[in-house]
Amino acid sequence: MRQRVTELPAGYRQYLTIDLQHDKKTALKVNLWGVAIMVVLFLIGALIKPISLILDRDEGLSAFLLHWGVVIVSMLVYLVMHELTHAAAMKYYGSTKVRFGFTGMYAYAGSEVDYFAKKPYRVIALAPLVLWTLILTPICFAVPQDWFWPMWVLLVMHVSGCIGDIWVTLRLLREPEGIYVRDTGVEMTVFSGK
């Protein structure tokens, strides 16, 4: 089976659609899992460094505003980098045209002309989670103590923001190896020859 095709093999037909933009029930479930992951990661962070560091009165208002201003800007930059990571993985597997967008609820990178086999699609879906977790986690522990919580919040937002990618990957685990997936950004359509 080829990693990516622009035309489905003979006999392949659509049999599953995962639409995180319009399927409100699934979107709610995915977002609740994202919130649960946030809570767990905040609790883990509190075990590593006292949460009272967030409101450290010794640092002063200007330092507090600097820390959290950096977090806000970093989140916006990260959002772009997350989608560029998906796009780089798509390109690695031969995508000819990646499209970017923002729906108001989700930022996305997708392609309307590429169909990816199951294994490469897993790499595409999970690439931001793996790459940015490997980058952000060591940063949390390398920065001075007063920067731990701002960087931890960025890491928490990153991991919880990957919940859609994680959910889709888990959903596709039980599908047969011969499938192809077209990911237009917030809608994944699965095609099978069986």
Image (spheres, rainbow, N blue to C red):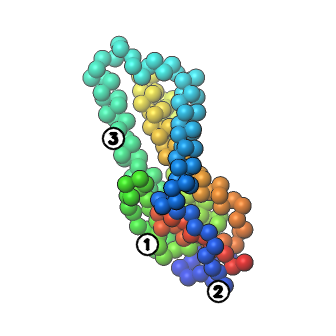
Residue 164 seen in this snapshot: no
Residue 31 appears in the rendering: yes
Tell me whether the residue at label 3 lies in contact with that at label 2, contact meaning CB atoms closer than 8 angstroms: no
Q: Residue at x 33, y 41 (%)?
A: 73
Rendered position, 84 above or below 159: below
Element on which disc 3 rests: helix
Residue furthest front as drawn: 25
Kindly identify the amino acid type of the residue bearing the numbered disc 2.
Answer: Ala
In the picture, measured across the screen, residue 100 lies left or right of residue 29, that is: left
Report the number of numbered marks. 3
| Residue at 70% over, 72% down | 178
Placement of the C terminus among the 4 image quadrants: bottom right
- Point 46% across, 18% down: residue: 52
- Residue 132 lies, in percent from the top left, at 50, 46
According to the picture, the residue beneath numbered tag 3 turns out to be 73
Q: Position of residue 155 (x, y in %)?
A: 49, 38
| Mark linked to residue 97 | 1
